[in-house]
Image (cartoon, grey):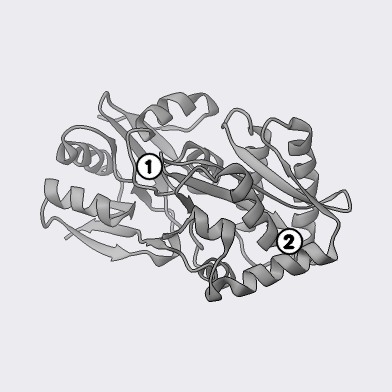
Amino acid sequence: MLTFKSLELKDKNIINSYLRQQNYRASDLCFTNLYCWGRKFDTQFAITPDWLFIRFKDNNGRNSYLKPVGAGNLKEAIDLIQKNHSSFSSPFQMRGLTKEMIKEIEDAMPGRFDYQLNRSVSDYIYTTEKLIHLKGKKLQSKRNHINRFKRENDWKYHSLTGNRSLVEECKNMLDKWMEMNKEEKDPSLVYDDHATTLMLDNFEYFNLKGGLICVDNEIAAFTIGEPLTEDTFVVHVEKAFTSIHGAYTIINQQFIENEASEFSYVNREEDMGMENLRRAKESYHPDILLEKYNARFK
């Protein structure tokens, strides 16, 4: 029988030893996200010599599982979590499944599951070249925003990587950003603040990369990310003051140019079903919409 336990900071190395074996490019499969959003989703894990199992609560409080990560007999691994789930009253379900994962499940257990697209947790993935150079007619407005920002502001880009004092200053900027956005109706904003604070508090321990934009020597925007797979970088956090025209656009471009240019792709994570966030991510015309599905037994 599997024994699940809550994620702790000290579990980073053991979790990563399994996650390094995969190349799905899915933002869920990252210790930083699993740990920092663990408060919202009650994320837990269990391991065997061959497999890592992740269990969490969906938005309705029902236990859910990611596809097991590891090597070996996938059917046996799924049977293990199904047996573990038998003590709960809710239906067994796996979530966050990419098409690549579904193919592997179907090869191991053909015809056992129904799959339903979950658009709100599908990841937006872009080529690094696109986000740096913003070429073409479709991204003309992005170039215009950046050009206006540069004309109107005395600005500088600074890397957070290896600069603890600037990381601490970002916490003050986050407090100001939260104060300015406190009227937002989105209930996940509190969890977003908690997750971002954990990333800043544990910036070096998570081996994160970050960057900020200063305008008149004050932080106007910052962002945080890290390598996800061999060819893909993931952006976890992007905060900017909308009162400064183009602040979001310039930090997006400058961060990738300065911190992630060696990667082929950038995963900017999901839109969480928020219409404004969906429009913002779609406005960059993703090269890959990494669709994710929920699975339940037929």
30 above or below 105?
above
Q: Residue at x 69, y 30 (%)?
A: 162
197 above or below 267?
above
Q: How far across and down, in percent of the image, does residue 97 sit?
A: 31, 53
Q: From the viewer's perspective, is 100 left or right of 14?
A: left
Is residue 249 or residue 206 the one in the foreground? Answer: 249
Amino acid type at image mark 2: Ala
Q: Can residue 26 be spotted in the picture?
A: yes
- Assign a secondary structure to mark 1: strand
Quarter of the image with the N terminus is top left
Q: Residue at x 35, y 49 (%)?
A: 64
Q: From the viewer's perspective, is 36 left or right of 13?
A: right
- Assign a secondary structure to mark 2: helix
Q: How far across and down, in percent of the image, does residue 173 sit?
A: 79, 49
Q: CA distance from mark 1 to mark 2?
A: 37 Å
Quarter of the image with the C terminus is bottom left
Is residue 139 or residue 53 the one in the foreground? Answer: 139
Q: Quadrant of residue 73?
A: top left
Which numbered circle lies on residue 167? Answer: none
Q: Which residue is mark 1?
A: 55
Q: Residue at x 62, y 64 (%)?
A: 186
**Closer to the camera: disc 1 or disc 2?**
2
Q: Which residue is mark 2?
A: 247
Is residue 265 or residue 45 the one in the foreground? Answer: 265
Is residue 197 or residue 127 the one in the foreground? Answer: 127
Amino acid type at image mark 1: Arg
Q: Can residue 268 be spotted in the picture?
A: no
Q: Quadrant of residue 148?
A: bottom right
17 above or below 33?
above
